[in-house]
Amino acid sequence: MYRFAPSPTGDMHIGNLRVALFNFICARQAEEPFLIRIEDTDKARNIEGKDREILEILSLFGIRWDRINYQSENLKFHQQLATKLLIDKKAFACFCTPETLEAKREAAKAQKIAYRYDGTCKHLSDEEVLNNEQPFVIRLKKPDAPVTFTDLIKGELSFAPDDIDDFVIMRVDKTPTYNFACAVDDMMFDISTVIRGEDHVSNTPKQILIRQYLGYDKEIRYAHLPIILNEAGKKMSKRDNASSVKWLLEQGILPEAIANYLILIGNNTPSEIFTLKEAIEWFDLKKIAKAPAKFDYKKLLQINREHIRRADAKEIAAKIGYSGEDIGKLAQFYTEEASTLHEIKEKIDKIFAPKTCEDFHEEFELLKDIAQNAPFFVEFDDFKAHLSQTSGLKGKRLFKPLRVLLTGAQSGPNLSDLYPYIKNYLGEIIK
Ligand code: GLU
């Protein structure tokens, strides 16, 4: 089983979506089920409704799941297994107060050495533990030897015991830390492969160690995806608008284009434009570059134009608030000069809005009158000839007001190229 494990604590970042896409693709390729695990154990940080929003976004991208699990429902297993680790002496109760630990952390900082837990509570006897009524956390005992694993993207990685440290697995309030809940759940749900962001790479030895101590010997494979950098070469953060999936969708970028782009970057793909379904046929995790991927908004817009052109015309019309294949085709035609559905909608709304023309006011009114009473012309040239003959207008005195009359804009595509898409709507346009 593969899994995607979002925390309902904030907006979906493109990095998260990329992780979700890769897991979904690999699950399909391996013909294994796909689990969504909502990591909601950090009650203080959970945002009401974020879980549903995440699921809606996944659905919009064509990501389907076979199972869904809210991590908070697994609490009793986390507590039981933490107790087992205590009994087996693989973990220990730690009564150090946050203030004491903070002071030690500060002291380490002042000496410019990395802070490590100093083992104060590691060797307490059972009696000392049982007689102590103070609140405690549970820490896992650090290993004796390095923890090594082979990452599917990064290759072999090794972590020294001191870097793993005697880390906390259960908090004072008897809730699991991220590492413990994650390690246990990956085991309980028989996860075969974990694909996630590089920011989790130092968590992996901890999660491996937890399962080793629990006696689980089935290997889980790991792939850590390089981070995505913004155009300035810095890690994409919340401050970069384009890092938010919601923002990109609000701009009028198609989910198909966003998915295409996120699969394309830092990868070696057989073509540049593809669907998720096609990607399932050839995607190869091993081809993902080790170096960070760079986000290029212009490239995403170019891919969006391609997907708008390839989409079903009726669907495109519906997405911009119109109906019918013709308007969809008109929208697709406008990808010549607009990149997002938002921009395209603006152009098309202008075409259908009442118009005024200041520079050539009289010519405009005259043409409007003639056009409103004109017969239907299949060809633009015939339409133009009729307007010119009837009005006596030529050159820019004809073309400038005519462009405004047909598009509501001063500049834009060749009217002869545009005409085939609008000729059946002239009655609604010329006003
Ligand atoms: N909830 C974690 C996150 O969103 C999951 C990390 C993981 O896949 O283990 O970063």
Image (cartoon, helix red, strand yellow):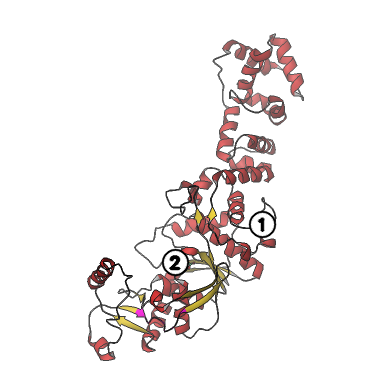
- Asked if the stretch drawn in magenta spans residue 141, the answer is yes
The percent coordinates of residue 374 (x first, y second) are 71, 17
The percent coordinates of residue 143 (x first, y second) are 41, 82
**Marked residue nearer the N-terminal end (2 or 1):** 2
- Provide the residue designation for mark 1: 269
Residue occupying image coordinates x 42% and y 72%? 179
- Asked if the stretch drawn in magenta spans residue 392, the answer is no
Residue occupying image coordinates x 73% and y 19%? 383
* Amino acid at circle 1: Thr
Q: Quadrant of residue 267?
A: bottom right
Between 231 and 1, the one nearer to me in the picture: 231
Q: Quadrant of the N terminus?
A: bottom right
> For the residues marked 2 and 1, what is the alpha-carbon distance in whole angstroms?
32 Å
Magenta residues, as a range?
A: 139-146
Between 116 and 298, the one nearer to me in the picture: 116
Secondary structure under the numbered disc 1 in the rendered image: loop
Q: Quadrant of the C terminus?
A: top right
The percent coordinates of residue 269 (x first, y second) are 66, 57
